[in-house]
Amino acid sequence: MTLPTSTRQWVLSRHPTGLPILDGPEATFSLQTVDLPPVGDGQLLVRTRYLSNDPAQRGWIGYVKAERMYMPPVKIGAHMSGVGIAEVVESKAAGYEKGKLVMGLAIGWREYAVVDAKDLSLIPEVEGIKPTQYLGALGFTGMTAWYGLKEIAEAKPEHVLVVSGAAGATGSMVVQIAKKLIGCKKVIGIAGGDSKCAWVKSIGADECLNYKSPTFRKDLKAATPGYVDVYFDNVGGEILDMMLPRMQQGGVVAVCGAIAAYNSTEGLHLKNWFEVISMRLQLKGFILPDFLAAGKAKETVMELATAAKQGKLAIGDENETVVDTKFEDVPKTWLKLFEGGNTGKLVTKL
Amino acid sequence: MTLPTSTRQWVLSRHPTGLPILDGPEATFSLQTVDLPPVGDGQLLVRTRYLSNDPAQRGWIGYVKAERMYMPPVKIGAHMSGVGIAEVVESKAAGYEKGKLVMGLAIGWREYAVVDAKDLSLIPEVEGIKPTQYLGALGFTGMTAWYGLKEIAEAKPEHVLVVSGAAGATGSMVVQIAKKLIGCKKVIGIAGGDSKCAWVKSIGADECLNYKSPTFRKDLKAATPGYVDVYFDNVGGEILDMMLPRMQQGGVVAVCGAIAAYNSTEGLHLKNWFEVISMRLQLKGFILPDFLAAGKAKETVMELATAAKQGKLAIGDENETVVDTKFEDVPKTWLKLFEGGNTGKLVTKL
């Protein structure tokens, strides 16, 4: 096989203000072909096989105050950032032989890339665990759920816990870790649709409420008669507002995501803000990179993998939605995140 | 002197939805005359001399879900609750002689009252400290500032601190305790008006910003080039939203009050909510009664009083606004709180 000398890549054309736009003169991204540089010492030429789709990516392209970002924002004209899994095609780095699978944020929305090996990690070859699990359950989303529950919310067996976006990549791991590993007294998921809710219950939630139901507000009240100790918030928006009056005195809101706000310019409207004072609530924002920087990631992945092998976490086909995608449709598949169509981790397969 | 057998009192007529209404068929309060019960053993007949005016009182009359209140809400037809200072007129309780001054929440908006002595505390007679200081600087507002800074925000000398409502009863104590007792690197007040700001600086703030100024947003940015470690929030509303992008990574918002929301049905609109996640902010609601229940109040008042005697806290005429008020005008004086006219503690003198 001849090695490629160029690659297609998706670059950021303009910062979106609302939902990113796929086509036309206002398109957020554009498809380019660029030459590949030669592979230097310590570098790899890789071919992208899978891309992780994450709501956080919306934050990387919409915000321009770089000093306030937890990672450098994507610049206009640069390729779109994203965690991916790629196969080594040519290697000038020891330990990264041709054919090995590697993963990392350095891959991005590119068909091929020349990358420093130190910016990638090898996918462990463990029987019964698919590589794509390292993008979700055993990767960033699993760890986000883990640290959010253990370190931020300090969830305990005696707690009643509610998690929104419960059918999503992070939320579905929150449900499982809270119920099966921590053993929370009651775990209530919130998801958009009855079939998603059925799935959330199948992975361990005691109850799941469909926020699209006209009776949702009443259902939420009925499901939380003794109030809620921990709310793991993946969505922000009106659901956060509805949760405030359902919180227990001294309750904690682990603020993980605000998918309701990513594509909106309207912000968050909290009618029930006063509950924060009267019920002494704590709202705590957090992001995964702080915990990764603390150097405990390997240990955490090991704990998750061990739990999975012991059958305490369901991680198989059921906790990911893998979408076969042509490279031309990478942004389109990513946008499915905001349509709420997936259960578990949304993975692009190239 | 003949002892009174009846008293005038202000009772709650209806729960207000917005700003309480003084007159007409929709009036929030009404003035009644009721008979006084006989003074039993362990009881006192007292005459109210001063009333404390507190934004929190708005919460006690607007909210009807008693189980979610940190104290029983005021019922329709009951006299309005409020902390007051009264003089003992007749005593059947040892240690509470006629002429002594007592204070407590049991007094409320009544000219005279028959009260259990155990529900009141004697005002300490200390040279150079006026009784009304025990309603403010050495009372609930001083303690609110103290615990909010020490226990909730954990303010430290290396911190840059912003406090809203800085000319108010709690805010002005926050300025003084943060600057003079904790020694925060920089203390920035926010207040409504240039003369209020001049006063806030006179009691110790490094800077004070007038939120009514057309350049406020720019001024806030200019005053916080290195961002803010602690925001002591007495007001909620748009100022809270503007503060979020000014917070330091890992910064704490001590959520003490939401005066902007008390008389509004619109709630809080946070355009910058995403900062809570990206900057890992902590928003922590708190109320004074939790700390009073912990039994440390006497010790705290002593620390504040000692600081005052040593000249480290300015507590004199300058940190209270005492309004001579006819009993018929008690609600009217209280409503001045929401007009923002006072500097320091707003006290009603009967």
Image (cartoon, coloured by chain):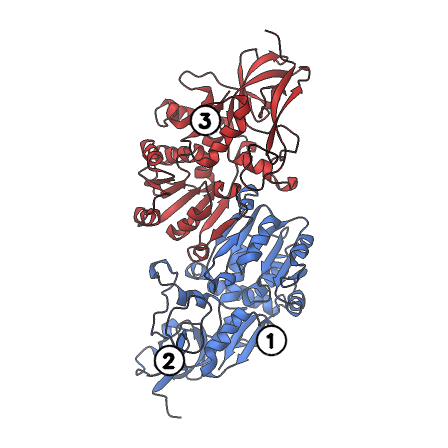
Chain colours: A blue, B red
- Numbered disc in front, either 2 or 3: 3
Residue B22: assigned label: none
Question: Type of residue at label 2?
Answer: Ala
Residue A317: assigned label: 1
> Dot 1: within a 10 Å radius of its alpha carbon, few (fewer than 14), some, or many (20 or more) residues?
few
Question: Type of residue at label 3?
Answer: Leu
The disc numbered 2 marks a residue on which chain? A
Q: Position of residue A146 (x, y in %)?
A: 53, 60
Q: Position of residue A229 (x, y in %)?
A: 60, 50
- What secondary structure is marked by label 3? loop
- Of A48 and A30, nearer the camera is A30
The disc numbered 1 marks a residue on which chain? A
Residue bearing mark 3: B138
Residue at 35%, 41% (x, y): give it: B210
CB contact under 8 Å: marks 1 and 2: no
- What secondary structure is marked by label 1? helix
User: Disc count in the image?
Assistant: 3
Alpha-carbon distance for marks 3 and 1?
63 Å
Most distant residue in the bottom direction: A1
